Every structure is written in C-alpha cells, then in structure tokens.
Image (cartoon, rainbow, N blue to C red):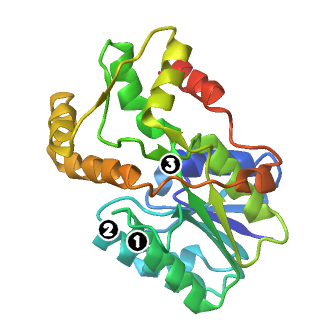
Amino acid sequence: MNLLVTGATGKLGSKIVEKLLETVPATDLVVSVRKPEKAGDLKARGVEVRHGDFDQPETLDSAFKGIDRLLIISADGANETRVKQHKNAVEAAHRAQVKFIAYTSIGNAIQSKMFLAPPHQAAEEAILKTGIPYSFLRNNWYLENEIGTIQGVMKGAPWVTAAGSGKTGWALQQDYAEAAAAVLVGEGHENTIYELSGKPTTQEELAAAVGKVLGKEVTVKQVDDETYRNSMKEAGVPEFVLPMLVEIQKGIRAGELDIESNDFDKLLGRPATPVHEALSQIVEQI
C-alpha cells in the first residue's frame, strides 16, 4: 500500500513522516513537496520524494499517481490562495483515483467563524464532493503557536492577550502528528471526523502553567484588540502579521476553539500530552 504525505518538510509534516517511519517500511511511503531538494534526507532513507506544488496542479497529477492513501496537510498563506490550493490538491487526488484522503482541518470547521476557517471549509466540501472515503482531522491549536509569548515571559514581559475568558484546546504538534499517522495507516477511519483538542484552557490558566514550569509568577494583561495589536507590533511582529493575530484573539474570545473532545484517546489510546508536561518540553527547546 502506497501512502503519501504532502508538505512533508514542514513542521507538522516532518513529525508525521517520522512517526510513520516507525511503523511502515520507507518503501511504502511517498512524500510530495514543493522543493524536493529539501527532502534529501528522506530520499536517503528510502522514501520516494516527488515534486508537488499546490499552485501547479500538473505537478500534483504526477505526485499522486498510484497512491492509495493520501494525507493532505493544509497550506499556509492568505485565505483566498489557500482555498484554491486545497481545491487543486483535492481535484488532483480525484483524478489520480486515490482511495482515501485524510485532511488536516480546523476545529469545528463547518460551523467555525474563525477567520482561518474558510479554506478548511472549502477543502472539506471539495473532498466530500469527490465521493472518496475521507477523514477530517480537525486540529484545534498548536501549543507551539505560543512560543513567542513564552519567550517574552521568560524575559520578564507580561502575558498579553485580548482573548478574554475564551478557552483553547492547545496540544503539541507531536500529538497532532501521531494522530494523523494513526489515521493514515490504521483501519476503520473511512468517512470520519476527529475533533482533536487538548483540554480547553483559558489564557490565565495557560499563563499560570507556564509560570509553574518556569518557577516564576506570570502576570496576565488582558487588553482590547487595538492595544494587543500595538503590543505585538512593539514586540517586533511584522506589520502584515498583526491583523491575523488580532483575529485569532477575537476567535478565541468568541469561544471558537473551546472544544471538548476525547478523540485523541480514540486515535492514540491516550489524551493529549498534559499541558504542564507539554510546556516543559517546549521550554527545554527554546
């Protein structure tokens, strides 16, 4: 059986590939990447590396040829661009007669009002239209997304947020990667939706957990959107990123990532890594 992972040199994709290589022969695994030269280490280990660019559908036709089970990792970028890229990938999978598609989506995708949701909604809808058996891996939020804030706290800055009392189901990328690998190689995942979420946690609760790991008190500063934007700008965040960060805070504040689920247990046989343990791992790597 041939398995293919797109975006295999990215942060999430590389973790998924490593997990897969623990259970399947390298000769059963194919990766599709925009820049094959960046996957030389995988090629050296026996993994077939193919050129696949979501902006160039013709490359996807050859990349997906002969593939049985496909994992499409959602792209990065502007929403309009991502919608087109995801549709290109799904249509190429259909043309290639792929037998199963797993897709990394966003929490509560179809109902979500998060500004990041539209590309995922379009992808899920496109996959459903193909009639190909699928699994939607609705990833909540990466704990690694908070590394910048954690680094600021380590330097003495307060934990600045505009998310109010909104909760987020943070989990490590490694947990999401292991769940994706389990679905790609496992049985019984056809036409399934998994809401992959850690225990919903407020900003105050997360900041307190960070403080416990660091052995220091962390002050949480709740601010309005404009103050948050200015704070992020002063912290050195590029101008073009600021609107996205504000929208994320708005979404969390509105409860868009407050999702209770035990789907990690279903796929991994355990919950997401406890937040204190997960934060300890992150702090060690900073």
Residue pictured at 18% horizontal, 49% vertical: 240
List x then y, in percent, for residue 58.
44, 81
Of callouts 1 and 2, the N-terminal one: 2
Type of the residue with mark 2 = Asn
Residue highlighted by disc 1: 119
Which quarter of the rendering shows the N terminus?
A: bottom right
The crowd level at tag 1 (other Cα within 10 Å; few <14, some 14-19, many 20+) is: many
Contact check, label 3 and label 2, Cβ < 8 Å: no
Residue highlighted by disc 2: 79
Residue pictured at 56% horizontal, 26% vertical: 279
Residue highlighted by disc 3: 141
User: Residue 54: in sight, yes or no?
Assistant: no
Of callouts 1 and 3, the N-terminal one: 1
Of callouts 3 and 2, the N-terminal one: 2
Contact check, label 1 and label 3, Cβ < 8 Å: no
Contact check, label 1 and label 2, Cβ < 8 Å: yes
Image height of 162 relative to 32, above or below: above
- Mark 2: which secondary structure? helix
Residue 6, disc? none
The crowd level at tag 3 (other Cα within 10 Å; few <14, some 14-19, many 20+) is: many
Foreground residue, 86 or 281? 281
Residue pictured at 61% horizontal, 31% vertical: 275
Q: Is residue 6 left or right of residue 78?
A: right
- Mark 3: which secondary structure? strand
Type of the residue with mark 3 = Trp
Separation of disc 3 and disc 2 at Cα? Answer: 17 Å
Separation of disc 1 and disc 3 at Cα? Answer: 16 Å
Foreground residue, 1 or 156? 156
Q: Nearer the viewer, mark 1 or mark 3?
A: 3
